[in-house]
Image (cartoon, helix red, strand yellow):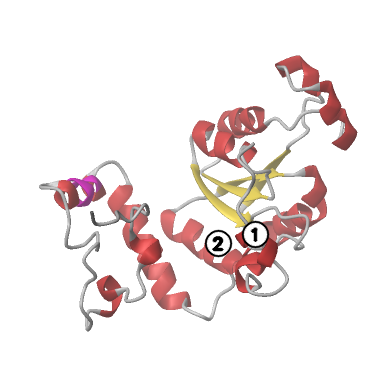
Amino acid sequence: MEKQDPVCRSCIDCGVVNCSAQKYQYPEFCLTTSLEEGELEEALSLYDEDRNREIMLTAAQVEFEGYCKLTRVEEIMDFARRMGFHKIGIATCVGLIRESRALARILRVHGFEVFGVACKAGAVDKTAVGIDPACHAVGKNMCNPIFQAKRLNREGTELNIVVGLCVGHDSLFYRYSDALVTTLVAKDRVTGHNPAAVLYQLDSYYKRLLIPSDPA
């Protein structure tokens, strides 16, 4: 009996990327060649809804004109200007408040109105939402991403920038933000907030990540 491959193969298993190169053979599991009927058409039709087309075209123009020339901070400002956004929100970790102050300084110099909300705003004890008291070991007060989103919603921000929110907290912020959200800093305390460093060092310093976890 033929042994079945336990891995459900997708784009992350592709070494060809012919969807971009257009000069190689598509692999058998390619998502481009194994579309469900109407699947791609449905996705494309959504670019005509709300502001999706404007956002997509603007993002493409920012990429084209700033390719390998503009920093991400500059790209965010360029995108905001092209979209006609003036009021920018910053959802920051308190551990990166200095970085967020620097970001606000840059944005204000370039004419944007800026309002920031730190993750500990409200100063609520972690146990108030059922977090294990043992978690006080890394700080008494909870991060409050839903409050951050709601407060920025009340301020009427037009674009929100995430600066170092924790894993999961960032997910809740994205979920409750009325404004579009872009991320400037992804938190990784171990790598100095450069999480891609782990991927670049997977065959050396971070080999341990290739050791399966004990399911128990």
User: Alpha-carbon distance for marks 1 and 2?
Assistant: 36 Å
Magenta stretch bounds = 42-46
Q: Which mark is residue 52?
A: none
Q: Nearer the viewer, mark 1 or mark 2?
A: 1
Q: Which mark is residue 77?
A: 2
Q: 67 or 116, which lies in front?
A: 67
x and y percentages locating residue 138 in the rendered image:
86, 37
Assign a secondary structure to mark 2.
helix
x and y percentages locating residue 49 in the rendered image:
25, 42
Q: Amino acid at mark 2?
A: Met
- State the residue position of label 1: 209
Q: Earlier in the sequence, mark 1 or mark 2?
A: 2
Q: 37 or 90, which lies in front?
A: 37
x and y percentages locating residue 193 in the rendered image:
72, 60
x and y percentages locating residue 158 in the rendered image:
51, 43
Which residue is found at the position 75% from the left and 63% from the top?
A: 191
Image quadrant in which the N terminus is located: bottom left
49 is higher (above) or lower (below) than 207: above
Pointer 1: residues within 10 angstroms few (<14), some, or many (20+)?
Answer: few
Q: Give the farthest residue toward the bottom.
A: 23
Pointer 2: residues within 10 angstroms few (<14), some, or many (20+)?
Answer: many
Would residue 132 be found to the left or right of residue 5 on screen? right
